[in-house]
Amino acid sequence: MSLKIYTASILLTVSIMFVGTLLCLIFPDRLIHLFTDNKETIRVGATALRMISAGFMVSSVSIVSSGALEGLGMGMPSLLISLCRYIVVIIPAAFILSHIVGVTGVWHAFWITELISATAAGIIYRRATRFGR
């Protein structure tokens, strides 16, 4: 995958995630209300959605890198990115932050995970495509 296509894919994904972030920041209660009428769930969910959406745009790097590597037949580097996002970082981060900050720590773990995973994904993608030639 050329650097030009990779960069364009990230920019397009960031644009889409930007819209999603705006919606989650402006209308979090209305979005949660689509799934429940419980006022407490809406209140807590809106708070969570605002925090989680902080990682939406940065997650573009992980999403595009993982998909590109998979498409290039480089399943192992793609798997490493997915493991980083879904297990290696999020579980310890949520566990540690929940003990430090309480339940809001779990929500903060999402954007922190996206930031760490995006950094790792960028490194993994560069190494995999450089050594894959």
Image: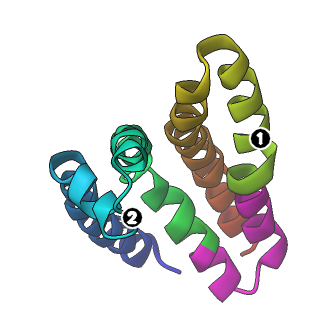
State the image coordinates of residue 115 (x, y, percent, origin top left).
52, 39
What colour scheme was applied to this rendering of the protein?
Answer: rainbow
Residues under labels 2 and 1: Cα distance? 27 Å
The residue at the far front in this view is 38
State the image coordinates of residue 103 (x, y, percent, origin top left).
59, 28
Question: Which disc, if any, is residue 10?
Answer: none
Q: Amino acid at mark 1?
A: Ile
Q: Judge by depth and name the residue closer to the eye, 14 or 77.
A: 14
Mark nearest the camera among 2 and 1 is 2
Q: Judge by depth and name the residue closer to the eye, 21 or 72.
A: 21
Q: Amino acid at mark 2?
A: Thr
Crowd band around label 2 with a 10 angstrom C-alpha radius: few (<14), some (14–19), many (20+): few
Q: Is residue 119 above or below residue 18?
A: above
Q: Residue at x 59, y 77 (%)?
A: 67
Q: Is residue 49 left or right of residue 128?
A: left
Q: Secondary structure at mark 1?
A: helix
Q: Residue at x 80, y 78 (%)?
A: 75
Reply yes or no: does residue 96 show up in magenta. Answer: no
Circles 2 and 1: CB atoms closer than 8 Å: no
* Prevalent SS, magenta region: helix
- Per the rendered image, the range of residues in magenta is 67-83
Q: Secondary structure at mark 2?
A: loop
Q: Residue at x 62, y 54 (%)?
A: 121
Q: Judge by depth and name the residue closer to the eye, 12 or 18.
A: 18
Who comes first in sequence, dot 2 or dot 1? 2
Question: Which disc, if any, is residue 36?
Answer: 2
Residue 10, picture quadrant: bottom left
Question: Which disc, if any, is residue 91?
Answer: 1
State the image coordinates of residue 102 (x, y, percent, origin top left).
61, 20
Reply yes or no: does residue 73 show up in magenta. Answer: yes
Q: Is residue 26 left or right of residue 2?
A: left
